[in-house]
Image (cartoon, rainbow, N blue to C red):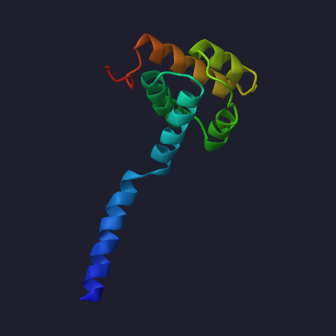
Amino acid sequence: MILRASAATLAALAVVLVGCTPAKLAEGRVRSALMDAGLSQPNAACMAERMTDRLTLGQLRKLQALQSPKRSIADYVMTVRRVGDRELIEVTVGSALLCAAGLAPERKPG
């Protein structure tokens, strides 16, 4: 009986963990960091999804280090430019433009 309960518990845990992939966990952290930096929830959600699909964890950590007071999306892009990572800048600028304009497929209506 205990063995069956343990097997069922492990199976349930495996199902839960499959939904919590590292990319999804990173996306949530990036979204929160973007919102903490002053971006709106819709823009932050859209940008986080695009950025976690396109950047390495090292690049995402660079973004996480850019904490400062609230700012506009343009101010945030200017801050990212100072990091000096070309791919990071391109992905951030592209994501910001597409998400702010509502043209990114990741942008949810709302």
- Between residues 102 and 36, which one lies in front from this camera angle? 36
Answer above or below: position of 89 versus 31. Answer: above
67 horizontally vs 26: left or right: right
Answer above or below: position of 67 versus 15. Answer: above
Answer above or below: position of 79 versus 16. Answer: above
Percent x, y for residue 29? 53, 41
For this orientation, the residue located farthest to the front is 69
Percent x, y for residue 53? 50, 36
Task: Identify the image quadrant of residue 76.
Answer: top right
- Between residues 89 and 35, which one lies in front from this camera angle? 35
How many discs mark residues in the rendered view?
A: 0
In which quadrant will I find the N terminus? Answer: bottom left
Residue at point 58%, 24% (across, down): 91
For this orientation, the residue located farthest to the bottom is 1
In which quadrant will I find the C terminus? Answer: top left
Residue at point 46%, 32% (across, down): 49
Task: Identify the image quadrant of residue 72.
Answer: top right
Residue at point 49%, 26% (across, down): 44
Percent x, y for residue 84? 76, 25
Residue at point 34%, 24% (across, down): 108
6 horizontally vs 104: left or right: left
